[in-house]
Image: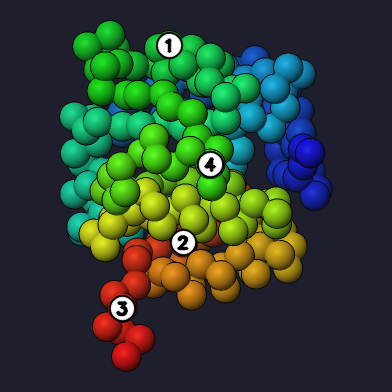
Amino acid sequence: MALVPYEETRGMGLQKFHQPLATFSFANHTIQIRQDWRQLGVAAVVWDAFSADTTSLFVCGAEDRTRAARMPGAHVTITDRKVALEFLKSNVQANLPPHIQPKAVVKELTWGHNLGNFSPGEFDLILGADIIYLEETFTDLLQTLEHLSSNHSVILLACRIRYERDNNFLAMLEKRFTVSKAHYDPEKDVHIYKAQKRNPWDDL
């Protein structure tokens, strides 16, 4: 099942998803991400939440800005479903200098499946852009976030609130994580939520 935006966005609307390249400037670097809507649909286009999520790194407080500042030298894992992995790898190779590429690992991840391929609590910072849209995946997504994060991890989720089910996911998230709204981009109508694992003592 594939979903498209419930209405045409400002500017180019849906046409932007059919452009071969999406260009962004981030941290004094220009990146060009190849898109292929025809072959891979929603898995191979850049959603508005992506650019809002990168912006959120600089508005989420001093601790998170420090994490962001370390990103150029950090080891990063970029995930997607198996069908999109080769396409994802080609974008990584096109945008990262050769000496940085070994620090960026492209790895298969289907929420709720084969989580043993990742060490529990392995990641300090987890970014998710527009991944809250299929209600039947919510339980698996929460399980995945719990597995990948530790009590010290920061999770940033960028999303549009399109339907009531999106609010339902946030309610589910708040039962397992401490959640706050970190940023709102009114131009793109994208919300950024910050989540961290609850301390079990907080519920006593």
Of residue 36 and residue 199, the one placed in the foreground of this image is: 199
Give the structural element (helix, strand or loop) at label 3: helix
* Mark nearer the N terminus (2 vs 3): 2
Return the mark for residue 113: 4
* Looking at the image, residue 86 lies above or below residue 180: above
Q: Amino acid at mark 4?
A: His
Q: CA distance from mark 1 to mark 3?
A: 44 Å
Q: Residue furthest bottom?
A: 204
Mark 4 vs 1, N-terminal side: 1
> Looking at the rendering, which quadrant does residue 183 occupy?
bottom left
In the rendered view, tell whether residue 37 sits above or below residue 168: above
Residue 160 at least partly seen: yes
* Quadrant where the image shows the C terminus: bottom left
Q: Nearer the viewer, residue 36 or 204?
A: 204
Q: Tell me the tag on residue 193.
A: 2
The residue where tag 1 is placed is: 94
Q: Please give the residue where the numbered disc 3 appears in the rendered image.
A: 200
The image shows residue 82, relative to residue 182, as above or below, that is: above
Quadrant assignment for the N terminus: top right
Secondary structure of the residue carrying numbered label 4: loop
